[in-house]
Amino acid sequence: MSDKKVGVHLEPHMVIRRPLVTEKGVHASEALNQYAFEIHPLASKTDVKRAVEELWDVRVDSIRTQNRKGKPRRARVALGHTKGWKKAIVKLHDEDRISFF
C-alpha cells in the first residue's frame, strides 16, 4: 500500500499553518529571499506552491520540505514528547517579497 495521499483537497489557508519567524529565518528572507512556514502534514510541494502564490500574490521558484520529529520531554515523573510537524522553505522570485511585519 502506498503512503501517498488520496483524494485530500486542502484550501490555501489550510496548507500554511503559520510563518516561522526566527532569527535564522529573518536572515534567510533578507539575504536569500527564502521564507519558512509550518505546513499541514499532508500538504505536498505543489499544494504549498499554490497556497503561497495565492495568499501573497508572489512567484515561487523552489520549495524544500522537512518532516520534523517531536522531541522527548519530561514533566516531573511523566514522560512524553512534543508533536511532530512539517516545515517548508520557500524560495521566491528575485523581484518578489513577503512582509510579515
Image (tube, rainbow, N blue to C red):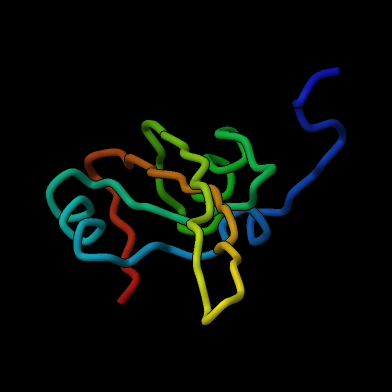
In-front residue for pair 52/90:
90
**Where residue 57 sits: x, y (%)?**
46, 53
Count how many numbered circles sit on residues in the image.
0
Residue 53 seen:
no
Q: Is residue 19 left or right of residue 83?
A: left
Q: In the rendering, at what x and y percent does residue 81 appear?
A: 57, 62
Q: Residue furthest bottom?
A: 76
Q: Position of residue 62 (x, y in %)?
A: 39, 31
- Measured along the vertical axis of the image, is residue 17 above or below residue 77? above
Instruction: From the viewer's perspective, tell me whether residue 7 is left or right of residue 14.
Output: right
Q: Where is residue 5, by image quadrant?
A: top right
Q: Is residue 56 above or below residue 2?
A: below
Q: Residue at x 52, y 41 (%)?
A: 67
Residue in the image at 75% along x and 26% along y: 4
Q: Quadrant of the C terminus?
A: bottom left
Q: Is residue 48 above or below residue 21?
A: above
Horizontally, residue 63 falls left or right of residue 72, namely left
Residue farthest to the left, as pictured: 31
Among the 4 quarters of the image, the one containing residue 19: bottom left
Point 50% across, 59% down: residue: 72
Residue 30, x across and y down, in percent: 16, 55
Regarding residue 19, the answer to whether it shows in the image is yes
Q: Identify the residue at horizontal 86%, vertical 18% (top origin).
A: 1
Q: Residue furthest top?
A: 1
Indicate left or right for 51 with 57 as reference.
right
101 or 1: which is nearer to us?
A: 1
